[in-house]
Image (tube, helix red, strand yellow):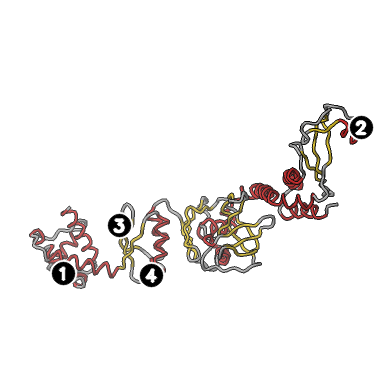
Amino acid sequence: MNKDLIAIFEYLEREKGIKREIVINAISESLRAAARKSVKGLGEKVSVEIHPKTGEIEVFTQKKIVEKVVNPADEISIEEAKSLEPECQVGQWLEISITPQDFGRIAAQAARQIITQKLKGAERDVIYEEYRHRAGELISGTIKRFIRGRTIVVDLGKVEAILPERNYPKLERYNVGEKVQALLLEVRDTDGGGAEVILTRSHPEFVEQLFIQEVPELHDKTVVVEKIVRDPGYRTKLAVRSFDPKVDPVGTCVGVRGTRIKNVIRELNNEKIDVVPFSDDQIQLLQNLLSPAEARKMKVFDDRIWMVVMDEDYPTVIGKKGMNARLIGQMIGKEIDVQKLSEYQKLLTIQMAELGDTPDESYDEKLKIEGVSGLILESLIGAGYDTMRKFMQAIPADIPSKVPGVNYYDLADKVLEQTRKKKG
């Protein structure tokens, strides 16, 4: 019995999921090529038989029985043939055992590379069969080793998967032997003819699948994640919608006392997660993303949205290194330009003063501001701001004291807009 070969069969079946007949076929083909190299005078009709239970190897060649041998590689004389098979006749094909005494050593050396290639192909087929339909699923494994710096090899059982350095947050650190959960991103071919399973922990869908694992309503589609964006390791934002009016989508994802979202946050090593109600209306979705902060002023352009927020809300809306505003912009599909209220008011005051100093005679006509009620205009005129120029040159703090309930900056914004329309 060839115990070494049997051990290989059992290992590949148990550890790699490769069936024994696939292994035998791969080895037989490689040994056939090795036999032709190691035994002189062999023709094309060479076959190798490997017993699946004992691992014994036999090499055969077929030769045609002839009266006179012309081609020794493919022919055998009738006299020699009868010594092997007394009942044979001229014209028949005779199968002859030609297993060399040292064939095991020679064959193993010659066949090693071919066997490796064949087994890679067989392993690739197993990988594709097992994992190609599981892209987008959560999968768990054990960290086996590190390659090429911080790229991680993860043992999934039958196969090893790759978790590239770019596919997990920079802040995360791992050790050999630790359990790791990730998203199966893809199965792809390798340059060596095999296949590899690629994992990710940085993709936004990884977070979505973690929520689906924790929230039954997401699993049964009562609640769906409409949009999700992420800066891996720092912050994730997801907008959710409920198809049942009785089900609060945000509360469902957060869970009682935050139990559901806490499990996701723990898996993400305390990454911040914002869950907001989705809206088809872009502005409403923006307001949901800003809450509890609020845009005091807003203008929507083709590629961006400009807004003014309270000074105390500005750091939260912007976030560390502009991350929060950037993620909000990705959610709504526009760049977000945020300005502090104090800066906006200062700029308004400067622009109004500059306009008030221009020689435009129309500014000396009776005060008229589009979109402002006649009652407010009469109150301003009564307080001494009877022309546009006088209003432009006013001290902002004086307006509410002389005309209670009137916000200078709201009126100044309308004046500037009116002026822009007039000029352009």
Q: Earlier in the sequence, mark 3 or mark 2?
A: 2
- Nearest to the eye among marks 1 and 3: give it: 3
Q: Are marks 4 and 3 in contact (CB under 8 Å)?
A: no
66 sits to left or right of 285: right
* Residue depicted at 63% across the width and 60% down the height: 154
Q: Which residue is mark 3?
A: 299
**Marks 1 and 3: CB-CB under 8 Å?**
no
Q: Is residue 141 left or right of residue 148?
A: right
Give coordinates of residue 202: x percent, y percent.
52, 60
Helix, strand or loop status at disc 3: strand
**Residue where numbered disc 4 is placed:** 315
399 versus 284 height, above or below: below
Q: Nearer the viewer, residue 73 or 193?
A: 73
Find disc 1 in the rendering and name its residue: 394
**Considering only order in the chain, which callout, 4 or 1, is on the residue closer to the N terminus?**
4
Which badge, 4 or 3, is on the more N-terminal residue?
Answer: 3
Disc marking residue 86: 2
Earlier in the chain: of badge 1 and badge 3, it is 3
Q: Residues within 10 Å of mark 2 (few under 14, many from 20)?
A: few
Look at the numbered disc 1 and give the secondary structure of its residue: loop
At 54% from the left and 62% from the top, the residue drawn is: 165
